[in-house]
Amino acid sequence: MIASNKLLAISFLISLWIFSSTTKASEQVLATITTDLNSLSYHFVVDSGEYQQVLDAFYIDNYNGSAQLNRDILPIENFISEGFIFPKKNGPNFVKISGENFDTALGGTISIDILTNAITGKRKTYNLNLSPGLSGWKLFYLGNEIHQIKVLGNKIPIIGLVGARELEIN
């Protein structure tokens, strides 16, 4: 009997640890964005309010390993009109995420625009769809639900990094 009580207590503590995070109940991680260039990762998060039916804001959480470095907040209006550029550095905008044909209750298209070559200015756009579901908001690419986006760097010998070669979307 004592062993089962210990097991129950340990299970409870593990559950608390797993479900405690920096996101509140109305927030949901849509996708984790990584790169083949460094250990930084980004969580693309949506805040859909108390009943998870209407989008309030998007966040980009920046991580180095498991340590959260910062959070950028992007209200829906700004997401649609300006988008979000990262990494935030002086120089060319390597990745821009923005909304198109967007409705806060129905979702819409999320465009990820990447700079493939800073020398030529060539860019490539990937269109994802954000849709509400029974268990929260879902992100889709080519009809498949996705959770991971990896940015692959485009390096040219002698010159170095000139952009993002492509995105691996899973």
Image (cartoon, rainbow, N blue to C red):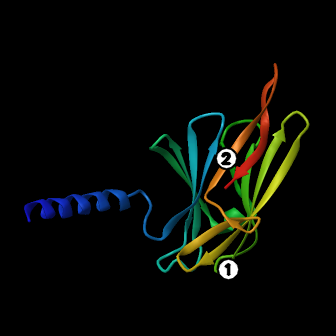
Residue drawn where x is 39% and y is 57% of the image: 21
Residue shown at the point (25%, 61%) measured from the top left: 11
Left or right side of 81 for 38: left
**Which residue lies at the image location 66% right of the left edge and 51% below the top edge?**
149
Residue placed most toward the observer, 70 or 160: 160
Question: In the displayed structure, does residue 74 sit left or right of residue 70?
Answer: right
Q: Which amino acid does label 2 sit on?
A: Lys
Which amino acid lies under the numbered mark 1 shown in the image of this protein?
Leu
Looking at this view, is 136 or 56 the one in front?
A: 136
Disc 2 element: strand
Q: Say which residue appears at 70% left-offset and 44% top-offset.
A: 151
The residue nearer to you, when weighing 113 against 19, is 19
Q: How crowded is mark 2: few (under 14 residues within 10 Å), some or many (20 or more)?
A: some
Residue behind mark 1: 106
Relative to residue 8, is residue 134 depicted above or below? below
Residue bearing mark 2: 150
16 shown above or below 85: below
Percent x, y for residue 161? 76, 30
Quadrant position of residue 119: top right
Up-down relation of residue 26 to residue 105 (above or below): above
Q: In which quarter of the image is the N terminus?
A: bottom left
